[in-house]
Image: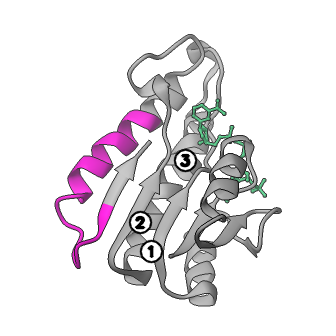
Amino acid sequence: MKILIIGGTGTIGKKVSDHLSKKHDIIIGGRESGDVKVDIANSKSIEALFEFVGKMDAIVCIAGEAKWAPFDSMSEDDFYIGIKSKLMGQVNLVRIGQNYLNAGGSFTLTTGILADHPVLLTSSAAMVNGGIHSFVKAVSLELSNGCRINVV
Ligand SMILES: NC(=O)c1ccc[n+]([C@@H]2O[C@H](COP(=O)([O-])OP(=O)(O)OC[C@H]3O[C@@H](n4cnc5c(N)ncnc54)[C@H](OP(=O)(O)O)[C@@H]3O)[C@@H](O)[C@H]2O)c1
């Protein structure tokens, strides 16, 4: 399979890309690292990425940031970091990427345990993770051509 892995050089991504590269053709995307440059917080950058790499059999995202800080110190802009990067970055990857996913292909997004078990400082990170979970449940009902979506 031809697999695009955004964040494939990161702490988690490196393990995933090392594993998948044994049996598949992988392309790694990142802002500074990887084979192709992309910033998922910028939808124009995502469009340019797909125009460059073309159609994929699977699209994996193991990237996206959110600010960790005490809730009483969080500004509106602090919340927008996670919304623009981890939440809308992955939503836009699916929104744009659906046009570049082969029939029967799959999206795999990343969240984290904070969605269900938040700890101190994670009002933004937990919120973003929960939003992605709900997005994936809903959009899985609408993907066409036998395409699937999962979140880890
Ligand atoms: N590590 C954990 O224990 C853990 C636990 C739960 C959830 N998670 C989640 O898993 C994801 C990855 O975590 P990690 O610890 O592996 O992170 P990491 O080590 O910081 O790696 C992040 C990877 O994503 C890329 N990246 C970051 N922002 C990007 C952007 N805006 N556009 C494109 N690529 C971007 C980075 O490459 P460039 O710098 O080149 O862009 C890098 O390859 C995060 O969403 C994190 O919240 C991690």
Answer yes or no: do the residues labelled 1 and 2 have beta carbons within 8 Å?
yes
Q: Which residue is mark 1?
A: 97
Task: Verify whether residue 14 appears in magenta.
Answer: no
Q: Which mark is residue 124?
A: none
Q: Compute the Cα span from label 3 to label 2.
A: 12 Å
Q: Compute the Cα span from label 1 to label 2.
A: 5 Å
Query: As shown in the figure, which amino acid type bears the numbered disc 2?
Result: Val
**Which corner quadrant of the image does residue 104 belong to?**
bottom left
Q: What quarter of the picture does the C terminus occupy?
A: top left
In the image, is 31 to the left or to the right of 119? Answer: right
- Decide which of 64, 82 is in the foreground and name it: 64
Reading the chain from its start, which is encountered first: label 1 or label 3? 3
Residue at left offset 48%, top offset 86%: 55
**Label 3 residue SS:** helix
Reading the chain from its start, which is encountered first: label 3 or label 2? 3
Q: Which residue is mark 2?
A: 94
Query: As shown in the figure, which amino acid type bears the numbered disc 1?
Result: Gly
Answer yes or no: do the residues labelled 3 and 2 have beta carbons within 8 Å?
no
Magenta region, residue range: 129-148
Query: As shown in the figure, which amino acid type bears the numbered disc 3?
Result: Lys
**Which corner quadrant of the image does residue 120 belong to?**
top right
In the image, is 108 to the left or to the right of 12? Answer: left
x and y percentages locating residue 142 in the rendered image: 19, 66
Residue at left offset 38%, top offset 65%: 106
**Which corner quadrant of the image does residue 41 belong to?**
bottom right
x and y percentages locating residue 78 in the rendered image: 62, 35
**Label 1 residue SS:** helix
Label 3 Cα neighbours within 10 Å, binned few <14 / some 14-19 / many ≥20: many
Label 2 Cα neighbours within 10 Å, binned few <14 / some 14-19 / many ≥20: many
**Label 2 residue SS:** helix
